[in-house]
Amino acid sequence: MRSGRHETIVAQARKELTQVVRDWRTLALALVLPVVLLTLLSVALSLTVNELPIVVQDFDGSSASNKLLTPSAPRSLSTSLPGR
């Protein structure tokens, strides 16, 4: 009974493969479409965050917390990352 299943699966796979090879448009679609979609989605989907506004509420009000919040040093993330 097990070999009958195996033969059925092989026959079905052979039939489907023959159909795909016969129709060149289906073969081209099966090979080209994933590459095109991968390229398109990799260009369209960008996870880079630029210019993210941040609000800080200072409940302490001490000189130490004021010193942390003064814009004396550049706070841009892109300038502090290596290689950018």
Image: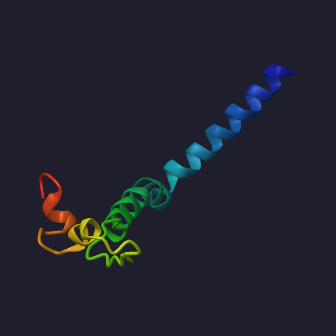
| Residue 27 rendering spot, x and y as whole percentages | 46, 54
| Residue 35 rendering spot, x and y as whole percentages | 37, 56
Residue closest to the eye, 13 or 73: 73
| Residue 65 rendering spot, x and y as whole percentages | 29, 68
Quick check: 17 left or right of 66? right
| Relative vertical location of residue 13 with respect to residue 52 in this rendering, above or below | above
The quadrant in which the N terminus is found is top right
In the rendered image, the residue lying farthest to the right is 1
Residue closest to the eye, 67 or 6: 67
In the rendered image, the residue lying farthest to the front is 62
Quick check: 84 left or right of 22? left
Q: Residue at x 35, y 71 (%)?
A: 44
Count of marks placed on residues:
0
| Residue 72 rendering spot, x and y as whole percentages | 11, 72
| Relative vertical location of residue 4 with respect to residue 22 in this rendering, above or below | above
Q: Quadrant of residue 79?
A: bottom left
Residue closest to the eye, 60 or 70: 60
Q: Residue at x 16, y 75 (%)?
A: 71
Quick check: 27 left or right of 71? right
Residue closest to the eye, 25 or 57: 57
| Relative vertical location of residue 70 with respect to residue 2 in this rendering, above or below | below
Q: Residue at x 57, y 43 (%)?
A: 17
The quadrant in which the C terminus is found is bottom left
